[in-house]
Amino acid sequence: MGKRTIRKTREDYIINFVIYLFLGIIFFVTAYPFYLSIILSFNEGIDAANGGIYFFPRKFTLSNYQGFLTDEKWILAIGVTTVRTLLGTIVTTLFTCVVAYGLAQENLVGRKVYMTITILCLYFSGGLIPYYMVLRSLHLINSFLVYIVPSALNLFYALVAISFFQNLPKELHESAHIDGAGEIPIFFKIILPLSKPLLATIAIFTGVGHWNSWFDSAFFVQNKNLRTLGYLLMEVINRSNLNTRSQASIMAVTSNIVLTPMAVQVTAMVIAAFPIMIIYPFLQKYFITGLTVGSVKG
């Protein structure tokens, strides 16, 4: 039996054309700024400052990236940011899921109290100064752990994970208990393998947050060896907006290769965004399942 097709009318073609045109405009407006940053990063810096580059590099060069890859400060920042992102993502994802799994158990003693505290902490904050004093009392100031420990528990992701765990079949948990399994084996051997969409969703958003973060590096870290890529990028952008003297110092800070402030900005932005662009497509298929299942109570 042949497949039946619906004949499109003239109005259907017009509507489809308008929709595709509208989506194409949105895609161009969204993607072009980053595309322009990429081609400017591959163009000779002084020539790029003259303007007139829109779709292709006019004077192709790799010197902008060579300047970054030969500068110890940027190499160290990339290393710190990479370690922070990997370690922070693992710690946050695992610790948040452990807490959420416990709060998802209806027989947990004091569950309503814990949930109330969680929601209150989600909406209200003590402010920057009390937060700084807490970090100082924990000896986290000027330490690499300040990137990891405070963000180990994300309350928003915990609420999503609680709803996700509550939607899993209770029979799995009960049958494992009947077989003599404890909570820890149940969580790691049964619950986590079934929670790949949730884990992928939390991991990608947490990873992006760690990779782009600069706030904690600016306020809680004075050791230059612990600066993150996001902080250096923010510093370069701020300094490039100052006077000509400051711009000259930016050109000198990146080894022996002459880099204009614009070249430093676009190259740093491309380097900062590149790892996320590589990882994002592989985890995108989990987003819809992870967020919708975790946000709807069955």
Image: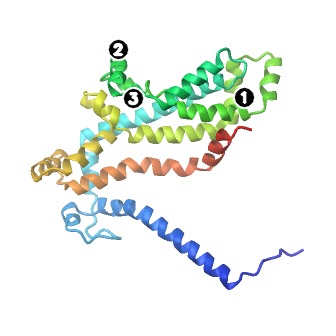
Give the x, y percent position of residue 262. 24, 57
Q: Residue at point 34% right, 28% down?
A: 128
The span from disc 1 to disc 2 (Cα, nearest Å) is 38 Å
| Mark sitting earlier along the chain (1/2) | 2
Q: Secondary structure at mark 1?
A: helix
Of the residues shown, which amino acid type is indicated by label 1?
A: Ile
**Which residue is under mark 1?**
190
Q: Is residue 2 above or below residue 45?
A: below
- Looking at the image, residue 270 sits to the left or right of residue 184; the answer is left
The answer to whether residue 15 is left or right of residue 86 is: right
Residue that numbered label 2 is attached to: 137
Q: Residues within 10 Å of mark 1 (few under 14, many from 20)?
A: some
Mark 2–mark 3 CB contact (< 8 Å):
no
Work out whether residue 229 or residue 153 is closer to the camera in this orientation and state it: 153
At label 3, counting other C-alpha atoms closer than 10 Å, the crowd grade (few under 14, some 14-19, many 20 or more) is: many
Residue appearing at x 60%, y 46% in the figure? 287
Amino acid carrying mark 3 in the image: Tyr
Task: Give the mark nearest the N terminus, 1 or 3.
Answer: 3
Q: Residue at x 58, y 50 (%)?
A: 284
The residue sitting at the bottom extreme is: 10
Instruction: State left or right for residue 136 relative to residue 189.
Output: left
The x, y position of residue 256, in whole percent, is 16, 49
Q: Secondary structure at mark 2?
A: helix
Mark 3 lies on residue: 147
Does residue 65 sit above or below 188 in this rendering? below
Nearest the viewer among 32 and 163 is: 163
